[in-house]
Amino acid sequence: MRHLYAVEGEAQLRAYQASVSLLQPRLEEYLHFLRTRYEVRSLPRAIVWTSAEAATSLLGSIPVPAYTNDYRVVLTADLSAWRDIYLRQLEGLPDAPETREIRAYYETALNENHLLAILGHELAHHSELFLDGFDSGREAGVWFEEGMVEYIARRYFLTPREFAAESHVNRLLVNLHSPRLGSCSLEEFGTSTYDGSYAAIFFEYWRSFLAVESLTARFGGVEAVFASYRRWHEEGERQPLAQWFSLEPPLKEPT
């Protein structure tokens, strides 16, 4: 894949090029991992590195500055922008120990590994293991694909300590927002995901990630979860995928 830059000025270009040069070796290793483990055969032609503002208002209209299709991935490498976006999940929540813990996490913990995990999420969407492809317009089991690509990318790029911390913070956020946002089924992911606040957007992603995390613990690994997913499809998808997997809230900590 080529690296393209949609930037304003030489200073921004140099900063993004420096970031990409540091990420490149690990990105190449990850692409090999995706090809050999998850049947990623066709990748976008380029990654477009840009600012959060350009990603969300000039190059696209999605409010999160990371997205993909068959031709390109669009992503901001600005960790401060991601920090600000994640902190907006706390808007409207009361000042409490949980919200202070989440705030401290996002203000101090984000690093290059987390940025790579965001990019890894977008690239894992191109796995042939997902039914019909992520951009096919298919509605059934969207939560599964979104949760699985988040899980795959985080497991690869985050250290065990970072992975556990991310899961913990996601669980706190889901629990805090569940009274207002948790009445919808997992199967409704995608129907209006980008129509609400950042809290509403990420609630869907974190809930789906936690569901996949619980499935991998129950089945003993990603491969076994995918095998069950294929059986669901081969047997005619006679029930929603979340029911097939017997997923019921609240999600418990995996053992």
Image (cartoon, rainbow, N blue to C red):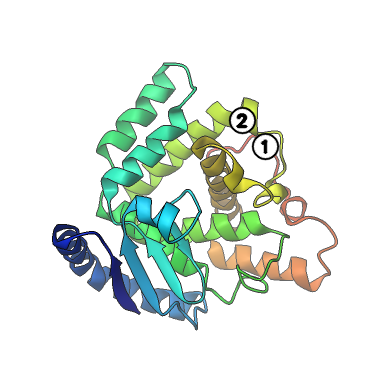
Viewer-side residue, 197 vs 187: 197
| 230 w.r.t. 145: above or below | below
Q: Amino acid at mark 2?
A: Ser
Give the number of the disc on residue 178: 2
| Labels 1 and 2 touching (C-beta < 8 A) | yes
In screen coordinates, is 117 left or right of 150? left
Q: Amino acid at mark 1?
A: Pro
Q: CA distance from mark 1 to mark 2?
A: 10 Å
Q: Residues within 10 Å of mark 1 (few under 14, many from 20)?
A: few
The answer to whether residue 155 of the structure is visible from this angle is no
| 102 w.r.t. 145: above or below | above
In screen coordinates, is 222 left or right of 82? right
Kind of element beneath mark 1: loop
Give residue 230's quadrant in the image: bottom right
Give the number of the disc on residue 249: 1
Residue at far top of view: 95
Viewer-side residue, 110 vs 191: 191
Question: Looking at the image, which residue is at 58% across and 77% down?
Answer: 128
Image x and y of residue 241, in percent: 74, 57
The answer to whether residue 214 of the structure is visible from this angle is yes
Image x and y of residue 15, in percent: 17, 59
Q: Residues within 10 Å of mark 2 (few under 14, many from 20)?
A: some
